[in-house]
Image (tube, rainbow, N blue to C red):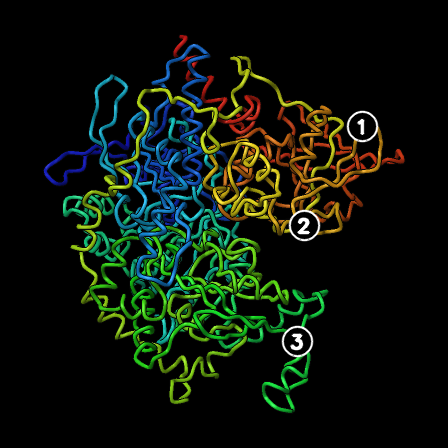
Amino acid sequence: MNDSFSTRRQLSVNGKSLTYYSLPALGEHFDLSKLPYSMKILLENLLRHEDGGMTVGREHIEAVAQWDATKDPDTEIAFMPARVVLQDFTGVPCVVDLAAMRDAVTRLGGNARQINPLIPSELVIDHSVQVDVFGRPDALDLNGKIEFERNMERYSFLRWGQKAFENFKVVPPNTGIVHQVNLENLARVVVEREVKTDDGASELQAFPDTVFGTDSHTTMINGIGVLGWGVGGIEAEAAMLGQPSSMLIPQVVGFKLTGKLPEGTTATDLVLTVTQMLRKLGVVGKFVEFYGEGLQHLPLADRATIANMAPEYGATCGIFPIDAEALNYLRLSGRSEAQIALVEAYAKAQGLWHEPGAPEATYSATLSLDLGDVKPSLAGPKRPQDRVLLEDMQVNFNDNLTGLIVGRKARVGCAESDFKEEGGAQPQASHLAAKPQSKIRIHDQDAYLHDGSVVIAAITSCTNTSNPAVMLGAGLLARNAAKLGLKAKPWVKTSLGPGSLVVTDYLRKAGLLDDLEQLGFYVVGYGCTTCIGNSGPLPDVVSKGIAENDLVVASVLSGNRNFEGRVHPEVKMNYLASPPLVVAYAIAGTVDIDLTRDPLATTADGTPVYLRDLWPSNKEIGDLIAATVGPELFAQNYADVFKGDNRWNQIASPEGESFRWDEASTYIKNPPYFDGMTMAVGHIADIEGARVMGLFGDSITTDHISPAGNIKKDSPAGRFLQARGVQPADFNSYGSRRGNDDVMVRGTFANIRIKNLMLGGEEGGNTLYYSPGGAAPEKLAIYDAAMKYKADGVPLVVFAGKEYGTGSSRDWAAKGTNLLGVRAVVAESFERIHRSNLVGMGVLPLQFQAGENAQTLGLDGSETISITGLVDGASRTATVVARRADGSEKRFEVKVLLLTPKEVEYFRHGGILHYVLRQLAARRAA
């Protein structure tokens, strides 16, 4: 490694001498005093990986050291994370790819053992548990049993991977959510590692903990000063194999916080406010850095909540500095005193330590928020950035209801006379008759469902369950409600999905777990559950009641995502809220209510109970945190974090350095990406004679694209599984079958809410197939049409609007697109991770010119498409020609979004994994 600026220094700490690359030493050459914290982390990364310009050269270091805050990103640098974290939905296909690469590198003349993670890679199994059972003491045990039955093949495969691969560990099921486990245990903040030197020796080095995660909410770790963000599984695999990630030097937006949160508000209210503000500013592709005197009033858990939702406000990261509060949290969460000493000494030696009143950095743009202005809020009903003040919730519900009931089928069996019989000839009878209701019998009582009925109330997600203030706040509200004899409404599916075992312990220690259970909030599992759509089935009578009158019902969840079709297919309105508000809405049973003015329930004697009567004070919450949350809880729960329980340890798994694929498996399959691969590198060719597979509008998310949720019996994936002997009851979810490309490709673009404008915007994953013979177009499922086009030898393209690919970093949104035969996606704008994933899978991302889209250009999806002028990736623009059936043409220019020379090289190879394979095989051959 090179050291052009002579920055290598020694740090003495804990009786050791550690080599580090000194930013203050570099500061003798450049003025780094106003450089943002996050840019200093990037700069250190470059210093440590300087290799004479092959990947990092002197000019890259100079570019970051002389960072121009106002400059649009145009300079490429390489970034190498210290480690990778994975969750099981995205992690299983990563390990499948690594296993397939072991086979492929052997065929190319290499050695299977060349394929190993070169940096620590830790997978947390948290995405598989589903809320099948709820509201009863044995819910946790039964859901765990069902989880293992459904996922035995996947778990056996992961146990093989844990044994076969070096530098790879698995946190078993029933432990927690990946980002919370990362925050509470896995994060190092500063790394001490034995590193090989150029002369073949090794030395102890100290450097910042940085991380790539195969989940967009990896940014939660930014709350403790660790730079990291979500990447696609493809990019994560490359990092695991020692490949740096190419990125453009970003702009950094500074977000200044002042004051402190007022009484009655929570970190959830704060993060929803921050999300709305940053979305309005526009921070896609940018770093966000929080600073200001308000930091001293923000506990680490609140910072983590804000950092967690960086994907929702659109930023690459949302980072906080290392300061005394960070050390407090490390100590609270049971980290060793030696590790804490290393973090403090290194941060101070490098100028990464933050003190109140320190000079402010220079930023590309700034926002400011007085924490005292934050008000109780929710977000919804279908986007996390659409904040709603609690006092405006009823109005918001009714405003959004109007569009959802247009064309609703005529009501069945509910005439005005019904209401007169029930309540007499009252003046409001006509008004009530205009609102449909479904009578159901549940828990031995009659109940009525209406538009706005809350059918799911879930305390879920690492965003909030990592925060003792909101969790204990929910418990105190539940205690106050239970004292008055209040319960959740019988039609509400209640669940408590803690992000770690620590949460249950401090709730139990505080005596609040019993109170939550009295209201129906029993622990259902330690995983993402409802936040990622694993909400499980609604009770049959509730489902039938919804369907009877096509009701628009709601969920209230303490999650971070509420996109259409994500939480539950029968629930059209979904609101994000703090855990205490989740409990409150479970008691109220509806979102058609103003909780700031109306009683949410009445006691047995008819006394109205208001939210203000139940809400705990900030002091009550703070005192309880001090009394119940301590290092011993973390120490005991993380002592054997990789060991697992009896269910995990009894799973049989194969041995050997190469995986023995089972052709009969519908969970794990050797993917076709490397079939027929040779050492020859291709070129980026123009696309001719393509057909349009989909014509989509704005905000097509990875939830729309990537197979997710339940598998429908009559879908292509459902038919495939049944043909393989799998009964519908055993389908499991798409997420659990991400290790099988046959299932996943059939579910790509199959979301029930996706709207293909080729079909007038009707919902469902269908398209029009145009045969080579010129027959009338045929309406087919997208998969079925794609396979016909593949048989015809016809490539495919997708047209879309703004924010294409927002949402979770699902690599299958790119893998499935590739396997369907899509060569290019043309959109008005892309989400950062999805664009990168498309490149990594050999699908070309193209961008309309400003002010243009498929509609302004008059495209309807019937055209034949050619894309020319790519010049083997050298051109920044290309020409699209859309030929209509009548022979007329529409010609327009698009931008080629291969943003760096490295991406062009990946694309020539057919994708990033092909590039890595050829590099490794060539090294072995040499």
Residue type at tag 2: Lys
Residue 278 image point, x, y percent: 50, 58
First along the sequence among labels 1 and 2: 2
Residue located at (66% from left, 76% from top): 414
First along the sequence among labels 1 and 3: 3
- What whole-number distance in Å separates the C-alpha atoms at marks 3 and 2? 32 Å
First along the sequence among labels 3 and 2: 3
**Disc 1 secondary structure class:** loop
**Disc 3 secondary structure class:** loop
Q: Which residue is mark 2?
A: 755
Q: Which residue is mark 3?
A: 414
**Disc 2 secondary structure class:** loop
Residue located at (56% from left, 66% from top): 553
How many residues crowd around disc 1 within 10 Å: few (fewer than 14), some, or many (20 or more)? Answer: few
Residue type at tag 3: Cys
Quadrant position of the C terminus in the picture: top left
Give above or below for 737 relative to 197.
below
Name the side, left or right, on which 6 lies relative to 143.
left
